[in-house]
Amino acid sequence: MTGNPPQPGETPASPGDPWTYVTESLSLPLERPAPKNPPLTTAGELMIIEPRPGEAPTPLPPVESVESPRPGVTPLPEVSGSPEVTARLERMENSPFWLSEEERRAAEQRTDYEPPRSRHRPPARNPVTALGALVLLSLLAAFFGWVSAEPFWLAVGHGDAGYATTTRCDGDGLTQQCTGRFATTDGSLIVAGVTLLGISGDGRQPGAIAPARMVSPSSDQVYTATTGALTHLRWGIGFLLVLICGYGITVATGARRMPSRPARRGAVIASFLGPVLLLGGFLIAAY
């Protein structure tokens, strides 16, 4: 670049001077890029087309309302199936678990908000009826425990072996009652006037002698039948009936209708524990 540069306030002398091109370029206005978002049109710039006389305005198409999902919740896909599956998916989508803290507080403040109801349990029955059933089932459990204690000890091998002598037999079948005398093999124990169980056939005749076993000297019953399946069946059925009485107490007293789970557990355990303790007491007494 040659030539004398123009001084401040001076105009270049000749058009061929290169400084003339620089000065003209600097004097041109700069072109600014168009804005990305054009300004909004004001009300005065809008064009309103009025309908012609006698011409009805063209109705606008209906706008479908789309319900926007709650923030942070992905809507479930449409399921075309059974109504049960659809209802279950709707309950899952509308569960309070997906609510935010603000939405949950707002729902709690609403008057029409109802919390989920807990499982309704029927009220307890008449206490007089429950008390009567408790007493009756306890007596039945005591009876079954009493008739099962001695067969249990005989089945496990406890007791004294000896001979029973029939003195008298009355009745037949379930009403049969036989009495007699029991003596151990070594003669160390002799008990008279005991009830003989398991007598049949010629053993019913007075003076008949049969092998027998006695649980303890304080017992008033002698078993002439040998230890076998029948003896195990007697104490097994008796123990089962004791447990059934415990279950009956649970149902009759409403132990499973208690309000809380620990209370229900404690009431059910107590219902079974009573008959079991009665059975244990008779086992200790018969030993």
Image (cartoon, rainbow, N blue to C red):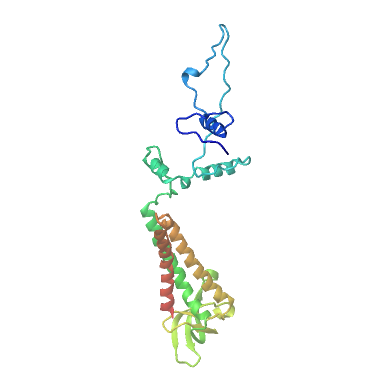
Task: Inspect this view and state whether residue 33 appears.
Answer: no
Q: Quadrant of the C terminus?
A: bottom left
Which quarter of the figure has residue 61?
Answer: top right
x then y, percent, for residue 28: 53, 29
Q: Which residue is rendered at x = 57% and y = 28% of the image?
A: 15
Q: Quadrant of the N terminus?
A: top right
Q: Which residue is rendered at x = 45% and y = 92% of the image?
A: 188
x then y, percent, for residue 257: 42, 54
x then y, percent, for residue 268: 43, 62
- Seen in the picture, residue 75 relative to 40 is either above or below; the reply is below
Q: Which residue is rendered at x = 58% and y = 9% of the image?
A: 55
Which quarter of the figure has residue 199?
Answer: bottom right
Q: Quick one: 16 or 22, which is closer to the camera?
A: 16
Q: Which residue is rendered at x = 48% and y = 89% of the image?
A: 184
x then y, percent, for residue 140: 44, 65
- Seen in the picture, residue 185 relative to 116 is either above or below; the reply is below
Task: Inspect this view and state whether residue 43 appears.
Answer: yes
Task: Give the residue at the far top of this rendering.
Answer: 53
Q: Quick one: 232 or 40, which is closer to the camera?
A: 40
Task: Give the residue at the far bottom of this rendering.
Answer: 186
Q: Quick one: 219 or 154, which is closer to the camera?
A: 154
Give the side of residue 146 with respect to residue 202, left or right.
Answer: left
- Seen in the picture, residue 48 relative to 246 is either above or below; the reply is above
Q: Quick one: 128 or 180, which is closer to the camera?
A: 128
Which quarter of the figure has residue 198?
Answer: bottom right
Q: How many marks?
A: 0
